[in-house]
Amino acid sequence: MRWAIDHDVRATLQEQIAACVRRGVAAGELDVGEQLPPAAELATALSVDRNTVLAAYRELRDDGVLE
């Protein structure tokens, strides 16, 4: 799965991360039961704060996309 964020767009980083996961699910790139990268690891890879990744993961969990 390709993780890409753009610091110059209007969507927040949290929204962009959540959108990446949603696209991955819709495209079949993420299988049921597949684990996402740990928040700290993804934050480092994307050069964002770990709490931003955690907030995106929480949003996805609250929306029923993640367990």
Image (tube, grey):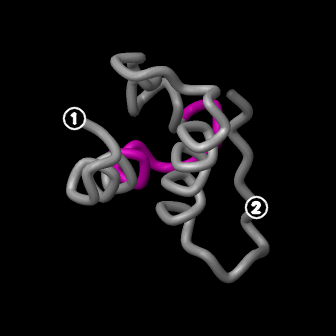
Marks 2/1: CA distance? 27 Å
Residue 34 versus residue 4: which sits nearer the camera?
34
48 left or right of 58 in image: right
Query: What residue is rendered at 57% in x and 32% in y?
Result: 44
The tag earlier along the polypeptide, 2 or 1, is: 2
Q: How many marks?
A: 2
Q: Which mark is residue 6?
A: 2
The part of the chain drawn in magenta is: 44-54
On screen, residue 18 above or below 3 = below
Which quadrant would residue 27 be assigned to in this image? Answer: top right
The amino acid type of the residue labelled 1 equals Glu
Residue 11: in magenta span: no
**Which residue appears farthest toward the bottom when viewing the image?**
10
Q: Amino acid at mark 2?
A: Asp
Relative placement, left or right, of 55 versus 47 is: left
Residue 17, image x, y percentages: 55, 52
Residue 64 percent location from the top left of the image: 25, 50
SS at mark 2 in the image: loop
- Residue 62 x, y percent position in the rendering: 21, 57
Of circles 2 and 1, the one toward us is: 1
Residue found 30% across the figure and 58% down from its top:
59
Q: Which mark is residue 67?
A: 1
Q: Nearer the viewer, residue 33 or 20?
A: 33
Q: Residue at x 39, y 33 (%)?
A: 39
Quadrant for the C terminus, please.
Answer: top left
